[in-house]
Image (cartoon, rainbow, N blue to C red):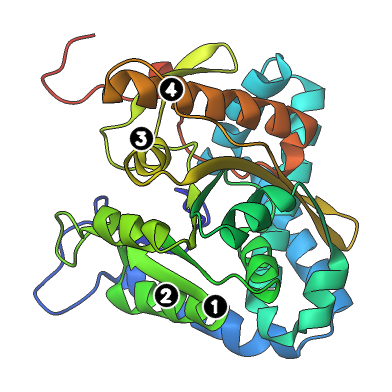
């Protein structure tokens, strides 16, 4: 579920430039080829060597201070209350790039990780909030920011006996999107496309609701709105939009809405599942969604502030950082 406009797993369908019929743009084909090589080669390299290489690559990109690194620094400055030019923020962004590239190193090597490695390497707190609800036949919506290693956290949940459903942004070229779906499918995830092939709604919401009513878990990244129809919330002292889906699903299906935060911990991984965000007893559906999404944002704030280096947000997020749409007012 990682999506960036820096070093990224391809471009989203919304941002892709037109290409001649039947052909993906050259840049997209090169990106797809690079990820194909990564999956084919990195898993056979000793882990210490792979970790060293990806750390060197992260440091090289950090020193170049390209667009994505500058955006990461601007985002982290909001988190720590500093200025993007502060040496402390600059050093934090270096740790952030190393964390981000560790995610990719682990993703490329994932087939080399045994069930025991995943379970032994994961320190999870609050897991009972998931397992107790599922044991009663109640679905859960686990909402999380783009932190740590989402795929390893998902594998942990699968290895604990609970395969789940999630959504993924459609990438370009289509072959890369299909590879990511297949990769996550091998981890035990059911992956639904966020949009239909060629654009438009993919009707993922209805499938997610069906899974929840059947008492199953759903996991959704939730701090960045990819639909342009999100809920405005206060986040680190400024306004942004977050997706309404997690709260809407909980309201419509009766599922428990559980915020979670992820981070890297030594050679392993940390997960904290927080207590349920309840549905307000009064108000319209939209008012309830706003209250619940703001509560999610508050939990994410705390988790990101505790582990800022593991928050992989290399895109614009806050409304005052976004470029106005053509024809829009100020």
Which disc, if any, is residue 240?
4
| Tag 3–tag 1 contact (CB < 8 Å) | no
Q: Earlier in the sequence, mark 4 or mark 2?
A: 2
Which disc, if any, is residue 244?
3
Would residue 109 appear left or right of 1 to someone viewing this image?
right
Between circles 2 and 1, the one closer to the viewer is 1
Nearer-the-camera pick, 179 or 44: 179
Q: Residue at x 17, y 10 (%)?
A: 329
Q: Earlier in the sequence, mark 4 or mark 1?
A: 1
Mark 4 and mark 2: span between their CA atoms? 29 Å
| Tag 4–tag 1 contact (CB < 8 Å) | no
Mark 4 and mark 1: span between their CA atoms? 32 Å
- Which residue position is annotated with label 1? 188
| Secondary structure category for the residue under label 2 | helix
Between circles 4 and 1, the one closer to the viewer is 1
Which disc, if any, is residue 181?
2
| Secondary structure category for the residue under label 4 | strand
Up-down: is 87 above or below 169? Answer: above
How crowded pointer 3 is (Cα within 10 Å; few <14, some 14-19, many 20+) is rated as: many
Asked where in the image residue 279 lies, by quadrant, the reply is top left
How crowded pointer 1 is (Cα within 10 Å; few <14, some 14-19, many 20+) is rated as: some
Mark 3 and mark 2: span between their CA atoms? 23 Å
- Return the x and y of residue 282 as percentages of the image width and height: 37, 16
| Tag 3–tag 2 contact (CB < 8 Å) | no
Q: Residue at x 75, y 26 (%)?
A: 89
Would residue 315 appear left or right of 174 to someone viewing this image?
right
- Return the x and y of residue 66 as percentages of the image width and height: 56, 42
Asked whether residue 272 is in view, the answer is yes
How crowded pointer 2 is (Cα within 10 Å; few <14, some 14-19, many 20+) is rated as: many
What quarter of the picture does the C terminus occupy?
top left
Q: Residue at x 15, y 25 (%)?
A: 326
Q: Earlier in the sequence, mark 3 or mark 2?
A: 2
């Amino acid at each position: 579920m990682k999506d960036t406009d820096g070093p990224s797993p391809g471009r989203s369908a919304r941002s892709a430039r037109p290409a001649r019929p039947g052909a993906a743009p050259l840049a997209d084909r090169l990106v797809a080829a690079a990820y194909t090589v990564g999956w084919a080669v990195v898993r056979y390299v000793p882990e210490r060597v792979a970790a060293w290489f990806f750390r060197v690559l992260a440091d090289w990109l950090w020193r170049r201070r390209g667009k994505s690194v500058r955006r990461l620094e601007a985002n982290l400055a909001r988190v720590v209350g500093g200025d993007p030019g502060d040496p402390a923020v600059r050093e934090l962004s270096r740790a952030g790039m190393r964390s981000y590239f560790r995610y990719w190193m682990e993703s490329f090597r994932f087939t080399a990780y045994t069930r025991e490695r995943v379970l032994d390497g994961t320190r999870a707190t609050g897991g009972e909030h998931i397992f107790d609800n599922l044991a009663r036949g109640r679905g859960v919506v686990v909402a999380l920011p783009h932190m740590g290693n989402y795929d390893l956290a998902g594998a942990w949940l699968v290895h604990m006996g609970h395969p789940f459903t999630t959504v993924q942004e459609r990438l370009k070229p289509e072959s890369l999107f299909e590879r990511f779906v297949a990769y996550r499918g091998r981890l035990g995830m059911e992956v639904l496309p966020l949009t239909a092939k060629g654009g438009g709604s993919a009707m993922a919401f209805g499938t997610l609701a069906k899974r929840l009513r059947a008492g199953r878990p759903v996991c959704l990244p939730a701090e960045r709105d990819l639909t342009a129809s999100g809920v405005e919330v206060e986040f680190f002292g400024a306004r942004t939009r977050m997706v309404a889906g997690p709260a809407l699903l909980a309201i419509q299906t009766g599922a428990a809405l559980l915020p979670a935060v992820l981070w890297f911990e030594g050679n392993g991984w940390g997960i904290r599942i927080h207590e349920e965000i309840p549905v307000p007893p009064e108000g319209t559906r939209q008012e309830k969604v706003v209250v619940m999404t703001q509560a999610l944002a508050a939990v994410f704030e705390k988790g990101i502030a505790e582990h800022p280096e593991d928050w992989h947000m290399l895109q614009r997020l806050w409304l005052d950082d976004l470029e106005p749409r053509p024809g829009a007012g100020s």
